[in-house]
Amino acid sequence: MSQTINLILTPKQAHDISSIKKAAALFLHLPANQITDLQIVRKSIDARQQTPKILLTANIFTNGEKPTATYSAPVYKNVSNAKRQVIIVGSGPSGLFAALQLLELGIKPIILERGKDVSNRKIDIAQLNRNNGINTESNYCFGEGGAGTFSDGKLYSRSKKRGNIQRIMEIFHFHGANDSVLYEAHPHIGSDKLPQIIKHIRQTILDCGGEIHFESKMTGLIIEDKRIKGCTTADGKNYFADALILAIGHSAHDTYRMLAQQGVTLEAKGFALGVRVEHPQSLIDQLMYHGAVRGDYLPAAAYSLVTQVRDRGVYSFCMCPGGHIVPASSGKESCVVNGMSASQRNSQYANSGIVVEIHPDDLPKEYKGALGALEYQEMVEHLCWQEAQRVSDKPSVAPAQRLKDFVEGKASATLPQCSYLPGIAPSRLDLWLPDIISQRLQQGFRDFDRKYKGFVTNDAVIVGVESRSSSPIRIPRDRETMQHIEIHGLYPCGEGAGYAGGITSSAMDGINAALMIAESL
């Protein structure tokens, strides 16, 4: 016999299976030895009160009964000789999950990835962190797994996209993610674990007869009578297929320009620009856990902040407790930062993007048109790079300012310790960032400090710039079929198409594109 129960536990109780069993026995008025097993269904932290609690939903099994599998394993078909095939440009979450869905449907995926496989990509990222320059095709943005591979691996999404979000978690689990992704309220894999899972997904695709071509940058579409036929790559090869999924990611600026030159309709969309802020993790723990010492049983505390400043949102993005700030540029004359956490989230720092909502109408008149928002984003990234070069001779150094100094408009003579490996140098971000960003950020930080007194402190540092939280471009598609509004067989999806944000919603978008293709074919 099994029953599903909801428990409210202390962090110490929730940390130990035997303690959970004792609490369950007490809840059910049973002797503890009658509970033979349990299966966690949902787990979250309630930190609203002075003493944080763990909310746990579990299936409790008694009288010798044992748990069964919580989900059915995916069944991937061998598509080596499939009559239908689909080109997928990009191997981020939308591209990889589209490929897996095509395998289930018996359609052959051919993935073209401009960057390197995840192992060789690690080498280039290590060189970038050592200030040895950037490989513009292999970095934190480009390469197997996409931008999320080395940027935390958070699987939480507020997306309301149609589809089974839990199935995304199950597929990650099938390919090696920990059990916790199946039940944590805010599941997280970690940048140390995700590369191995990406390798397992790659092996699934190859074992089933799919193709993956690394260092194969798409340089053109093959279009006849407004119908996609295939594409060309930088090495001079042509690929042909029944459909093409554009899963290019939000940083493929050169690909956007190529699409525009080929007459593919693009449009500017709202995006966000800001900075990455880093606090001591101990301070964030105190603020989020109401002054309580975190101890051994609570995770590194996270936060989610949002306010409105002059009709625009100012909010936290990609909050990384126990994490690091990383260089996330994809070009030689731009300075961009992002954040990541390893699976244990055990560094002494907590960082988050704090960004300002930007509408195309907010931009100066010289940044109008389909590529205007993209060009403005590039301008700010280049401005940050110029400032970095002014204050340091290291290639990947980033300009930084103590948080309270930024809010008060003061120079920082020195900077606190920071997790950003290439290094930071003092800079007046409050002066050189465009006013539509800096002034809203200053007020936004004041608002956050009113909510969490002590958030604005000179023990925290801001690092510039956080600019890749979303794409400034949308590739318009039909709402029902997901095909481009003008080109039959072209399926823009994921963050790069402007229809998703983050790993989970991008993966779901890729799955939906594959389903639409199968229906069309």
Image: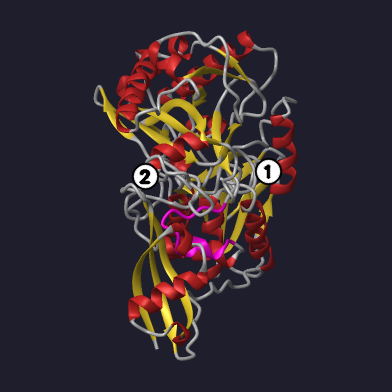
Q: Is residue 326 above or below residue 458?
A: below
Which amino acid lies under the numbered mark 2 shown in the image of this protein?
A: Ile
Residue position for label 1: 216
Residue 34 place in picture, x, y as percent:
45, 87
**In whole angstroms, how far apart are the C-alphas of marks 2 and 1?**
26 Å
Task: Name which residue lies at 49% across and 18% down.
Answer: 402
Residue 84 visible here: no
Q: Secondary structure at mark 1?
A: loop
Nearest the eye: 472 or 109: 472
Residue 342 place in picture, x, y as percent:
60, 46
Residue 357 place in picture, x, y as percent:
35, 29
State which quadrant residue 454 falls in: top left
Mark 2 surroundings: few (<14), some (14-19) or many (≥20) residues within 10 A:
some
Answer with mark 2 or mark 1, whichever residue precedes in sequence.
Answer: 1
Going by the image, does 396 lie left or right of 488?
A: right
Q: Is residue 251 magenta?
A: no
Residue position for label 2: 485
Going by the image, does 48 lie left or right of 434?
A: left
Residue 142 visible here: yes
Task: Name which residue lies at 63% across and 72% down.
Answer: 78
Callout in the foreground (2, 1) = 1
> Going by the picture, which residue comes out furthest to the left?
311
Tell me if label 2 and label 1 are in contact, CB under 8 Å: no
Q: How many marks?
A: 2
Nearest the eye: 87 or 3: 3
Which amino acid lies under the numbered mark 1 shown in the image of this protein?
A: Ser
Nearest the eye: 12 or 226: 12
Going by the image, does 199 lie left or right of 322?
A: right
Residue 422 place in picture, x, y as percent:
67, 25
Magenta residues span 177-189
Mark 1 surroundings: few (<14), some (14-19) or many (≥20) residues within 10 A:
many
